[in-house]
Image (spheres, rainbow, N blue to C red):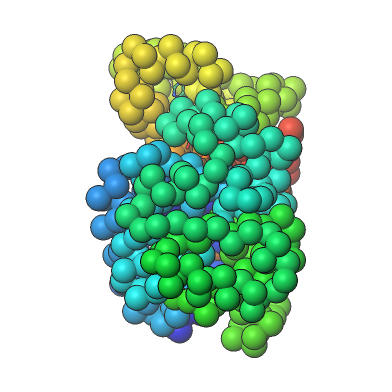
Amino acid sequence: MKLSLGCIADDYTGASDLANTLTRQGLRTVQTIGVPSDDLALPEVDAVVVSLKSRSIEADLAVTRSRAAEKWLRGRGAGHVLFKICSTFDSTDVGNIGPVMDALRADSGDTIVLVTPAFPETGRTVYMGNLFVGPVPLNESPLKDHPLNPMHDSNLVRVLARQSKTRVGLVDLATLTRGADAVRGRLADLAANDVGAAVIDAVFDRDLETIGSVALDHRLSVGASGIGLGIARALVASGKVKAGAAATVSESAVGGPAACLAGSCSQATLQQIANAEKTMAVLHLDPEQVIAGPDEVRRALAWSGERISRGPVLIASSSTPDQVQALQSRHGRDAAGHAIEQAMADIAEGLVRSGVRRLVVAGGETSGAVVDRLRIPGFLVGAEIAAGVPVLRAVGVKDGAMLLALKSGNFGGAEFFSDALKLMR
Ligand SMILES: Nc1ncnc2c1ncn2[C@@H]1O[C@H](COP(=O)(O)OP(=O)(O)OP(=O)(O)O)[C@@H](O)[C@H]1O
Ligand SMILES: O=C(O)[C@@H](O)C(=O)CO
């Protein structure tokens, strides 16, 4: 297997978002959980997206894991590696985007790396280096209240400069609009001035196509699904990947009980949970009790055990920004987050033990904890539920077929949970 593109995603929902984008552009793509073991039989593919859970861990550990993934991908022939970050640039002043980018850039030997979280299909655009989420700058969006990495600055040149050892520059929309050679010229000027990373504006998909073609001059780029789309289109346009070759994934029904788990506290997910109350049984966990001990998990499993044979259930820990803040001030941000993630993983394990084979999970960290606990080594990409969220068919699991959907906190329409289950038969 010689890869045309290697990808390292800093969380599992982001990885499935990117795998979805690459598949829709015609690349045969597989999503692996971590660096695959040698005995995982992978189909012939154009792209592998290695999913890490490295967004909110210690920066040094994120660097070590990302470098191991890069080594594996380069060893499979990947000439270009995309480090997939969140389209809302989720990070803190200590990382992990900057430190991982610095390390991968050093490994790749590139003098300068293109960076953009733009993903216009989901309303993420970058102008003059400022990230917009829909109509508002990042720092005015719901991301200002994120439980793990509240985003208070929309200027990505500044945000990245605080995290990275290199100087950070900007390729603005005016330059981009003049075409690939103008971008190349700007990058050469920046590199000559010791700038090692360039945030590049992008508002429309056509901007991403220009970015994709320039990115392929380099060995590394950093961004969200939008730059993935640009790179995929450039690979197809250059003939390096045969258009329309994406493997068809089995659509055979899996059946059996279905469940949804929500650990995301994003506004989008809170709204989707409220809407799900109309179509399925919903249990709201008491976060304080989750942290207190295992009884709340037992209560959730007993509750679902009584209902799941009659229809899908949704179990949510999600609460409003005020409640999240109150819980964190009592228990600490990381301790609270970790305890809830582990409880969600316990619940997922219990549900699967009782026969659930169709599982929807909302939230990147939550999905990471769940998928790790279920020991799923990888996924093939099926139908698209919403922008950035595909149906995933597990590969390499012992217990037969299993479908999952891993929803990024902010993604999906108002009826996301029922939309997902309609496609997960
Ligand atoms: N009620 C709650 N109070 C405090 N923290 C919570 C609560 N419910 C969940 N959490 C924690 O908040 C974090 C949510 O992160 P997660 O990545 O799952 O969602 P997200 O950030 O909205 O999604 P994404 O990363 O895909 O954008 C997790 O660590 C989770 O355990
Ligand atoms: O890019 C995004 O917004 C998502 O794929 C994601 O990474 C959220 O966790």
Q: Residue at x 67, y 71 (%)?
A: 210
Q: Is residue 371 above or below residue 22?
A: above
User: x, y (%) of residue 191?
Assistant: 44, 70
Q: Residue furthest bottom?
A: 239
Between 394 and 166, which is closer to the camera in this rendering?
166
Between 166 and 389, which is closer to the camera in this rendering?
166
* 200 sits to left or right of 277: left
Q: Is residue 112 visible?
A: no
Q: Residue at x 64, y 37 (%)?
A: 137
Q: Is residue 231 above or below residue 307?
A: below
Quadrant of res 69: bottom left
Q: Residue at x 62, y 31 (%)?
A: 141
Quadrant of res 340: top left
Q: Is residue 86 above or below residue 106?
A: above
User: x, y (%) of residue 329?
Assistant: 36, 14
Between 370 and 228, which is closer to the camera in this rendering?
228
User: x, y (%) of residue 41?
Assistant: 41, 72
How many numbered marks are there? 0
Quarter containing the N terminus? bottom left
Between 132 and 308, which is closer to the camera in this rendering?
132
Q: Residue at x 58, y 76 (%)?
A: 185
User: x, y (%) of residue 195?
Assistant: 42, 63
* 379 sits to left or right of 206: left
Q: Is residue 407 visible?
A: yes
